[in-house]
Image: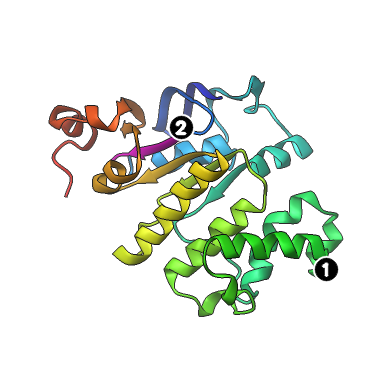
Amino acid sequence: MLELCSLSRSFADVRAVDAVSLSVAPGEFVGVIGRSGAGKSTLLRLINRLVEPTGGEIRFDGETVSGLRGRSLRDWRRRSAMIFQQFNLIDRLSVLDNVLVGRAASLPRWRSWTMAWPPADRAVAIEALDRLGIADLALKRADQLSGGQQQRVAIARALVQNPQLILADEPVASLDPHSTKLVMDSLARINREDGLTVLVNLHHLELAREYCRRVVGVAAGRVVFDGAIDDLDAEAIRTIYGAAPQ
C-alpha cells in the first residue's frame, strides 16, 4: 500500500503540491489527470524522492520512505521505477545497454562504469525487450529509434529494476496515436500480468477513460477528485480543468 499523508512541496512562494493525502492499493492502475502545471509531475517525483517534500509523509507497506537516506533511498528509487516523458535514454548507448542501466543499483558500481554486465542480467534485459516487442532492436543505438520505441525501451529499463511500483510521468505526451496505444497497452499489460502498481500522469482525459478504472484529479497542487472513472462527471471535469478539456 502506497500512502501519502498531507504531502506538500513548495518552490519559493509557490505550492506545487498542497497537502495531498492519498492511498493506492497494491496492483492498482491509477490515472492522475489535470491541466499542465497542476502539480502532477511534482507529485510523482516526490513519491520517487527525486524531489524532496517540504511537508508530510510518504509510506509504502508501512515503511516511511520520505525520510530514507543513502543506500535505503537508492533501494526505494529502484522499487519505485520512474518513466519520464522525455525517455531519459543515453543516446550513444545501445538499446540493450540502456535497459541494463536499470540493473545498476543491484550490481557493483564497477560493472555499470565498465558496461561489464553479467550474462544473467543481459538475459533479463533481452526478456524485458521481448515482452515489449522490441528485442530485435537490442543492438541499435538509442538515438536511432522512434519516440514510441524509445519509450518502450524506457519501460523495459524500469521492468529490470524489479520494481513494486511504476510511476509514469506523461509517458505518451510527445507520441503519435499509434505509439501512444503501444505504450499504454504495455503499461496496462504489465499491471495486469505482473500485478505491479502503476500511477500514470495523463494530460488527455480520453486516455484515462480507456485505461484507468480509478482517476485522481489534481488542480493547483490539490487533489480535487478521487474516484472511479465512471463517476467523473461534467462537474468534476470542470473542477479539475476549469473547463471541458480539449
Q: Does the rendering let one see residue 121?
A: yes
Residue in the image at 57% along x and 74% along y: 142
In depth, the one of 101 and 10 nearer the eye is 101
Residue in the image at 30% along x and 28% along y: 228
Q: Is residue 129 left or right of residue 227?
A: right
Q: Does the rendering let one see residue 174?
A: no
Residue in the image at 65% along x and 40% along y: 79
Q: Earlier in the sequence, mark 2 or mark 1?
A: 2
Q: Is residue 50 left or right of residue 232?
A: right
Q: Which residue is identified by label 1? A: 116
- From which residue to which does the magenta span run? 28-34
Q: Main secondary structure of the magenta part?
A: strand
Q: Is residue 32 within the magenta segment?
A: yes
Q: Which mark is residue 151?
A: none
Question: What amino acid is labelled 2 in the image?
Answer: Ser
Q: Which mark is residue 10?
A: 2
